[in-house]
Image (tube, grey):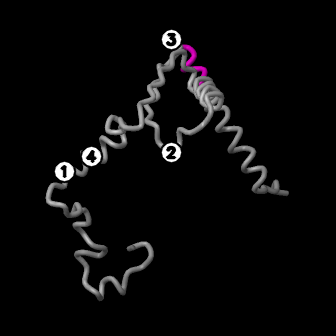
Amino acid sequence: MAKRVTGNSLWKDFSADILRKSNQILHDIAELNLPPVKPNWADLTDAGPGVGVSNYEVRFRDTELARVHGSDYRVRVHRSRGDSGQNEAERTNSAIGDSVVDGCTIDWNFYKSFNDLTDREVVEMTPNDF
């Protein structure tokens, strides 16, 4: 009599195999004796709408991020309200605005859907062809 195979037993076999292979990878990495990574973290903020929280909440959030990232050194630069031009998002938006000097939008959609197909070829398409 053949053994009855259920989805649950298949999943159990699959997850056990994944777990075994993952542990082998972690073991191989551990054998490399790599130095521990202690990233430095820099928060560059302006006085935008999301900054109006108490100092306790800021310190608590910074502590959470330090523990998540394992960082041992944090720098928090909080610029004044009138200095938002130094903010990374503001600088990026400004650079995009500077690249579009004629005031129009950037033309990005060069090829329309089914660009090189006839109407008949589009109608006859199967889901796999699509």
Tag in front: 4 or 2: 2
Which amino acid, by three-letter code, is at mark 3?
Pro
Q: Earlier in the sequence, mark 3 or mark 1?
A: 3
Please identify the dominant SS of the magenta region: helix
Q: CA distance from mark 1 to mark 4?
A: 9 Å
Taking the view exactly as shown, the residue that stands out farthest to the left is 102
Q: Nearer the viewer, residue 74 or 87?
A: 87
Q: Residue at x 82, y 57 (%)?
A: 4
Q: Nearer the viewer, residue 84 or 108?
A: 84
Which residue is disc 3 drawn over? 35
Which residue is disc 1 drawn over? 99
Q: Which residues are magenta?
A: 25-35
Q: Which mark is residue 94?
A: 4
Tag in front: 3 or 1: 1
Q: Against 93, is 36 above or below?
A: above
Q: Against 41, is 32 above or below?
A: above
Judged left or right of residue 94, residue 35 is right
Query: Are the residues flagged by discs 3 and 2 in contact, CB closer than 8 Å?
Result: no
Q: Against 61, is 128 above or below?
A: below
Neighbor class of circle 1 (other Cα within 10 Å; few <14, some 14-19, many 20+) is few
Tag in front: 2 or 1: 2
Q: Residue at x 75, y 56 (%)?
A: 7
